[in-house]
Image (tube, rainbow, N blue to C red):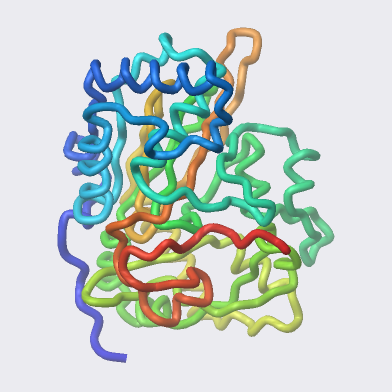
Amino acid sequence: MASIAPIAGPCVWRGTEIAASNRWIRPIDRAVGRALIAAADCAREAGVEWSSLTRDRLQVPGLDELCAQAREELENGSGMAKLTGLDFAGLDPRSQRHLWFGLGQHLGTIVSQSNIGLLMKAIQDEGYDVAASHGVTVDENGKPFLSSYARTLTNGPLRFHTDRCDVVGLFCIGQAAQGGVSKLCSTGAVHNEILKRRPDLLEILYQPVPRTRFGEEKGGETSIYLLPIFGQRDGRLTSHYSRTYIENAQQLPQAPRLASPQVEALALLDSVAAELAFEMVLAPGEIQLLNNHVIYHARTAFENDPATGRVRSMLRLWFAMPNSRALPEDHAVLWGRVDRGAVRGGIAVAA
């Protein structure tokens, strides 16, 4: 392949740099926050289901401007945004989903997170047995192997990965007594560091890797597809990465075996991501938005303390974005549509 050039632009940053910056933090104006809370409460009291809220049904002056700023930062800036300043104590717990879904309708197109059409997922520790029901198999040593989807529903750590959408959003409802720290890193910075250290391995990461759809589409545990870790189109980077789907593919006899250089390349990616990341903890009422094309995210293990109310709980939305980048044609195997601004991503609903 042609020589690979470094990625440039504001989406390339090191953790030490972005931790000291507030460019990605968007305070919610107090008046906007109050109006948003009032609109969410009004919709709930009127008997409107949160999943039925439309952009027109939840109109708040100033909200579209806030969402436009967030979209610009996500696509053409650092690749992430944090919305802060919402008076969470003033929000009726029964209206939490109304507020988040209504805000999300102004941000982008909300897409399905499961093959049954789940639009909003509570990310919290459901216990091993419950999580296993969302996707579990047995590895070569006879030990349980959880799907990526199932792992989010335990209190264990999550490795660096991306989600299957342009942007993933988390609305923090509660934090754990210990742990549950978000670790974020720039995909472009990881790309460039691998280019500097091992350009031969970076070339391998631009080549297709076998993966499964385990825990996603119906029958996905036996479905193999090929997709590279890195791709570019029109000079813009995209990366889709989850080690779990790659590892699960290697348990299936029909999947091509990973060569030693591929294993080495994936290990280097993981270690560089850890080096370049920074850590943050969302406070209740804060919203984290990440562009999956240019941000890897991970999570540390956590411990809840129900007696004191310190229980980690996030409400997750997946978005297709109106200002999203075009993707390489070979990425259609995962994304469906690859044109700029396409409604894409998410998980197909089973017939």
Query: Percent position (x, y) of residue 325?
Result: 29, 65
Viewer-proximal residue among 340 and 173: 340
Q: Residue at x 30, y 31 (%)?
A: 83
Viewer-proximal residue among 41 and 84: 41
Quarter holding the N terminus is bottom left
Please, is residue 301 above or below residue 331 in the view? above
Please, is residue 229 above or below residue 131 in the view? below
Query: Percent position (x, y) of residue 316?
Result: 51, 39
Viewer-proximal residue among 20 and 267: 20
Horizontal placement of 244 versus 345: left or right? right
Residue 88 visible (yes or no): yes
Horizontal placement of 264 versus 200: left or right? right
Quarter holding the C terminus is bottom right
Q: Residue at x 58, y 30 (%)?
A: 49
Query: Percent position (x, y) of residue 204?
Result: 42, 81
Please, is residue 18 above or below residue 94 in the view? below
Residue 170 figure quarter: top left
Please, is residue 91 above or below residue 132 in the view? above
Extreme residue in the right direction: 142
